[in-house]
Image: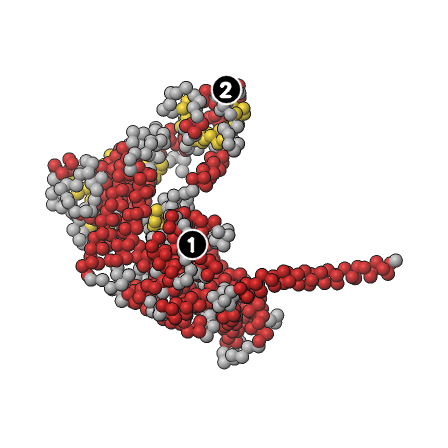
Amino acid sequence: MIQNAAHAIADVPVQAALRDWLSAGDALVGTIAPILRHLLANDDHSVFSDEIIARVRGMMVHVATQLLDEVAAASGQPEQRNHSAKAIQTLVQGFVADAGFLNHTHALALEWQLTERLQSRLALDPVLSPLLQSLVASPEPETASLAMALLAAQARFSQTQQRMQLPLAELPGDLLHASLLVMRHCAGEDEGSQSNAASAEAVIRSRFEEGRSRLGLISRLVMGMGGGAVAALSVSHAGIGIFLSALALASGQDREMAVLATNEGQLVRLGLALCAAGLSPVAVEEEFTVIHSDASLPQGLDRLSANQAAALLACSAAFPGN
Amino acid sequence: MGDGAILARAQSDGADNLVNADEPLAGLQLRCGGELPGMIAIPALLETVRKARSYGLKLARPILANDGQDVITAWVEVEPLAAPEEGCKIILRHWQAAPLAPEDLAEAGSRRAAIDRTVAELSARLDAAQCLLAAESEASDLTELIAAMRAGTGRPWTDFVQIEGDHHRQPLHWRLLDGAVVRVPGSDRSWRATLLPQETPGSEPSGFELLLCADVPLASAALLALQGAESAQPTNTPGLVGREMATVLRQPIARIIANAETIRTRLAGPLAEEYSRYAADIAAAGQHLLALVEDISDLEVVEAEDFSTAPDRIDLADVARRAAGILGVRAQERGITIDAPKLGESLPAIAEFRRVLQVLLNLVGNAIRYSPANSQVWIRLEGEGSRSRVIVADQGPGLSADQQARVFEKFERLGRSDESGSGLGLYISRRLARAMGGELTVESAPGQGARFTLGVPADLLASAPNPAR
């Protein structure tokens, strides 16, 4: 009797653990079908194409590598560039757990995919758009120098995307902060690694300046154009990077959401965002056709006012704050 | 990235209070309901500052704010100081204001109901015929009314109060009574009635919630009584242009200006110089049209019979400094120096802050517009007995006696035919001054510059030496 009871008590944690594992497995089983269906049904423009996944993973590994480089430098071994695959993987797992990080890197990968697609289809320069050209030639020295800085940043973006990389300086402040927290969390237990991680963190934080990142420069330039920002709402004139930021600003969405809106599965979202940004029906159709050469504009958009379109967008579950 | 385009600087402390701020940030902080110094009241700015401080990162991003009239997009750069408890340095670079999109009616209605329920000082339940079932209030000046209502359960609520401007047999249809201004026996305050129907889909309401909201809380009602000012809120029906037309007109005009600006700055590609200049003309004419719409809608407000202001205890020196701050950039463009009251100077007065600022912006704006380049504009203060005065003096061409007589008239432009004004500014300013129990006058001679004087009632309580201190 007594023996049996003791046996039962010892069993409980084992069973609970097994149950947990099983339910984690259930969750996976439940998602196999929809993910597989999605992967099979969509071609290369999918939000989950092999290329996109590889790019997202590449960027995360690059961020992890840069953090480890800094820790190595802080521990007095700046030439140490070979980090163990395990150390990198631990950091990457931390990034993957952060939804904001995932969204951002995914959006960058989609943006680059769109950039390459429009380059091959419309010969759109991925670095120097007509708008950027006229901003560089601006008589105002302030605007011209900002535009030059953006030109350099945009060139850097092309290069790093081709290498599937993401420099720390290009991260939005919130994500840099999140990645530093992951790094702090993953640092070794001993005092030495803790203090190395802490001093690496201090170096990274003091060096960071959000306003100098590509996305920072773009939004500052778009803001500086004032009423002229309408000119940034044309893909072929402004280029993808500036267009997406301007669209996000003008339609009140996150930039990540604006990027996602250019995907094939989000035709209505794109149409509404263009409307909400205040473009005329003709211009909406034009931009829509540039991005999707073979899809047609969703019906009824031309009857919406900018405010109505913005209100519809704001009701969407994916809108910030919903 | 030079310091070229900095619009304003500000500083926050370790608890995210705005310690000091230049215009236009300071104004936005106040319009968002904050104080200066005080907790940052602009939500997007607060979020950015908090992040910069806790992350220890230099952040730079666009912020979106809403001051009740406009949607404002601004570019801010926030740099945390060495120690987190020191707060942040804030730099503002770009600033765009666009009129707020009209709200969804149902949403606005439900929010209004929620606000009224929160601030109502009397709430009552009515039946389908608007007869009283129960009433509740804690306000001391409503005890008489509550007693009468409780004694008169079953009678229409309109028997107990006096509906202003309406002598029909009461009660009218509830939609006509919703929002009515009412007078309550035993209370000096002016009240607004709100009727919220108990909706039953497809049929008439089965009952109502009646809310009475006062236009001022009890404490400041005492202050108003002290000033002997009329406190009736404007309940005028908007005229032709009024608020509605003005809102409708603003958007397309703003669009004309934005597009013309795009052409002018050649953002859409190369363009011959002449065309760029034409576009500049279009933009300037659009700006002018926008200003006209604003003036005309102001005109209708000040000309309404029941127009009144909401007097408060203000510091004229502070208003003057703020006006100088707002117009500083425009003055600089023309090489004009504005000599505003120094920090530390003060002149207490009783007037409505917003209206005094409007008058001063008009006076200083005129002074900048009509003065020669590289001249000076002075803003001086004068307190004398029961009057507090602000004087705006310039070195412009001055006005002849005949011009002085006409300058405050409606649409008077003194023979100017350029596109820089509507001829309404001074007319509106004088109406505003008079509505606040003050006066706006001018002294000038041709070639001697002009002196405009705005006089309002002095705040004798604040300026009198207080023996208790």
Rendering coords of residue B389 (x, y %): 26, 38
Viewport quadrant of the C terminus of chain B: top left
- Name the residue located 26 percent from the left edge and 39 percent from the top edge: B296
Left/right placement of residue B275 relative to residue B211 reads left
**Residue B346: quadrant of the picture:** top left
Query: Viewer-nearest of labels 2 and 1?
Result: 1
Q: Is residue A7 above or below residue A307?
A: below
Residue under label 1, please give it.
A298
User: Can you tell which mark lies on residue B155?
Assistant: 2
CA neighbours of label 1 inside 10 A, class few (<14), some (14 to 19), many (20+)? some
Chain letter of disc 2 in the image: B
Provide residue A196's location: percent of width, then percent of height. Answer: 54, 72
Disc 2 crowd rating (10 Å Cα; few below 14, some 14-19, many 20+) is: some
Number of the label disc, if any, that sits on residue B454 = none
What residue is shown at x 43% (from left), y 21% (from top)? B170
- Location of residue A103 in the rendering, given as x and y in whole percent from the top left corner: 50, 62
- Please tell me if label 2 and label 1 are on a single chain: no
Q: Is B298 or A282 nearer to us in this picture?
A: A282
The kind of secondary structure element at disc 2 is: loop
Question: Toward which corner of the image does residue A229 lie, by quadrant?
Answer: bottom left
Kindly identify which chain the residue marked by label 1 belongs to.
A
Q: Quadrant of the N terminus of chain B?
A: bottom left
Report x, y in % for residue A12. Answer: 76, 59
**What amino acid is found at the position of numbered circle 2 in the picture?**
Arg
In contact (CB < 8 Å): disc 2 and disc 1 = no
On the question of residue A138 being in view, the answer is yes
| Distance from Cα at disc 2 to Cα at disc 1 | 57 Å
Amino acid type, callout 1: Pro
Q: How is the image coloured?
A: secondary structure
